Amino acid sequence: MPYDEEDMSSIVKNSILNLNLPYEIEYAILNLEDEELLKSQQDFFCFLTNRKNDNLITSLESDDINSRIFAQNVLENAKSIIVILFPYLTDEHSKNGNLSMYCMGMDYHISVKDMLCEIVKYIKNFHKDADFYIQSDTGTLNERFFAFYSGLGRLGINSMIFSDIYGSYVNIGLIVTDLLLDEKKFEKKYCDKCMACVKSCPGGAINGDFTINSYRCASYITQKKGELNEQEQRIIKKSKKIFGCDVCQNVCHFNNNVKTIPKNCDIIKTIKNEDIDELSNKKFKEKYILRAFNFRGKSVIKRNLDILKDD
């Protein structure tokens, strides 16, 4: 079909509806040539550069600051970026398990990537020569920056993104394209700084100014390889999780009465020593192949289980 600028908004909308999901998907579209966006990218570039200079960039983050901010560089002639929030919370999720809720269900690296690919496939039916770059977590771009800038999600003082519908229980997907799409963005919003998350954080990682010290974050520590020092072990014991941490989400009133979605995978709330003791690392990865914690392997999970066992 021929290129039709007036039809682009409906094509993107219909590409998401084409997923046939039994729940609403929130999305925004940004023009990568917009001067206001470029200025915000420059400001965020300076912010991340300062964090890098202060040695606050962890091993789970790319230290290539330029690639984390400028979506214009990940695809030749990039003109637009589609930002999408994919909810994951189901009625079967529980705050009482020893896994963070985001990894109780299917690995979002799999599910979100599959949905992004389906969206791109649909758009290519109309623009077969268009180019695309997709990302959900495993990529260079800072997804939270684009979700906040687009107004798609409220920025929490814990640095998380909160959907008005699903709270912070969302994964962010990005699609960068050389198609010029009609912008769809909303007013930028912040949380009300009630400080509940600051007071409750097991590691005191939340600074109170919309930044965090990742090295003191229980979620980061549970994913860190190797031996942990006494302070890091104490933080894990406070969080009571062997992977991730939900404390700042659990105490946030923006997560009260949020909508849930049907499950797309069996929900695993807790892993015990007896579940993995007899497994090799290879068998562990085979058993938990659909789970987000799978990439760290058995040794990290076993280490964290032993720390909680000694509590």
Image (cartoon, rainbow, N blue to C red):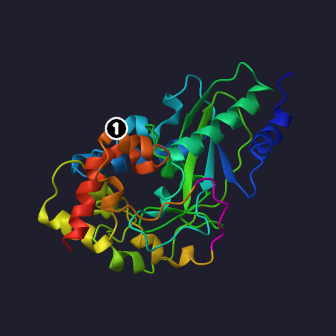
For the question of whether residue 308 can be seen, the reply is yes
Query: For the point 73% across and 58% down, which residue is it?
Result: 24
Specify the quadrant of the image occupied by residue 79.
top right
Above or below 202: residue 13: above
In the image, is 4 to the left or to the right of 161?
right
In the image, is 55 to the left or to the right of 241?
left
Above or below 92: residue 27: above
Residue 102 x/y as whole percent? 49, 58
Q: Residue furthest left?
A: 230
Above or below 13: residue 160: below
Queried whether the magenta region covers residue 262, the answer comes back as yes
Residue 204 x/y as whole percent? 27, 71
Q: In the image shown, does 21 or 263 lie closer to the viewer?
A: 263
Residue 209 x/y as whole percent? 37, 68
For the question of whether residue 195 can be seen, the reply is no
- Crowding at dot 1, Cα within 10 Å, few <14 / some 14-19 / many 20+, comes out as few
Q: Secondary structure at mark 1?
A: helix
Q: In the image shown, does 41 or 90 lie closer to the viewer?
A: 90
Query: For the point 53% across and 64% down, which residue is it?
Result: 168
Residue 25 x/y as whole percent? 70, 54
The prevailing secondary structure element of the residues shown in magenta is loop
Q: Residue under circle 1?
A: 282
Query: For the point 53% across and 56% down, which residue is it?
Result: 105
**Quarter containing the C terminus:** bottom left
Which residues are the magenta region?
258-265
